[in-house]
Amino acid sequence: MSERERGLTQMASQKDKEAKAATAAKRLPRTTLSGQVAGQIRASILDGTYPLGSQLNEMELASSFGVSRGPVREAMQRLIQEGLLRSEPHRGVFVPELAPSDLIDIYFVRRSLELVAMRRILDLPDRGGVVRDLSALVRQMKAAVRRKDWPQVADLDMLFHRRIVDEAGSERLTRSFATLQAETRLCLQMLMGGYSENAALIDEHQLLVDLIERGEIEPALAELERHFGDPVRTLQKANASRKEKLGAEAA
């Protein structure tokens, strides 16, 4: 092959690479758009804009977001995989409605994973990093409670427990916990009223931090077990709080 032919071949190869890059760049906004739509739907589910049990309509969502149905369909599929939406054949797509039995099962699995993580953390020679992070989250939680920002309290609660699991240093444990996060967030939506009824919320989290810092294994495990409590009882408190609020608004 002559020098000129080699040069032409290299130019053609370069143009081919540029064409592929341009094609990939053109696809990117569509992927980004579906991600943005998924983010907005996710936020609306978690803040109660789309209540548990409500049906989501693809065409209506596309219209409200000002996009075509394609990105909405992709977003909904992503949220179905996360567990924040449920597809029912011949009926449509719904925000899952959790029964008390679901609540018990989700918290049973969470408790099991976190107890394993806590035991491993307490075996670590250096717990300074996790103690600092958890302490910071407790301070933020305290500020959110003062503001009566219960959704923020729920977010910080979730971050607190996720940090405990992550510190165990097990990729598979973290992955298992992550699969529960979406359903846990739905649980927290159900239990939101229970936060305002739990006066000891900050003290419970601070005690967990103190026990981790001191390395007290059995007391820490016992406190974590107690901290989970009875989710159904918490749900009953949340429902009572919700009814009381609705009654006050109607009066």
Image (cartoon, helix red, strand yellow):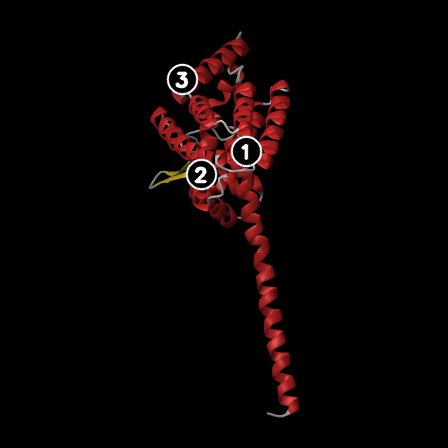
Above or below, comparing residue 211 to residue 90 in the picture: above
Q: Amino acid at mark 3?
A: Arg
Above or below, comparing residue 205 to residue 22 in the picture: above
Q: Cβ–Cβ below 8 Å for labels 2 and 3?
A: no
Residue 233 numbered tag? 3
Report the residue that reaches farthest toward the front: 125
Report the residue that reaches farthest toward the bottom: 2
In percent of width and height, residue 150 lies at 56, 23
Indicate which label's residue lies in the foreground, 1 or 3.
Answer: 1
Query: Which tag, 1 or 2, sits closer to the chain's start?
Result: 1
Residue 237 numbered tag? none
* Mark 1 vs mark 3, CA separation in Å: 23 Å
Q: Name the secondary structure under disc 3.
A: helix
Query: Which tag, 1 or 3, sits closer to the chain's start?
Result: 1
Q: Cβ–Cβ below 8 Å for labels 1 and 2?
A: no
In percent of width and height, residue 56 lies at 45, 36
Indicate which label's residue lies in the foreground, 2 or 3.
Answer: 2
Q: Name the secondary structure under disc 1.
A: helix
Above or below, comparing residue 143 to residue 7 in the picture: above
Residue at x-position 49% and y-position 26%: 216
> Splitting the image into 4 quarters, where does residue 239 fall?
top left
Q: Amino acid at mark 2?
A: Phe
* Mark 1 vs mark 2, CA separation in Å: 12 Å
In percent of width and height, residue 108 lies at 37, 29
Question: Mark 1 highlights which residue?
Answer: 159
Query: Which tag, 2 or 3, sits closer to the chain's start?
Result: 2
- Within-10-Å neighbours for mark 2: few <14, some 14–19, many 20+: many
Toward the viewer: 183 or 48? 183
Q: Name the secondary structure under disc 2.
A: helix
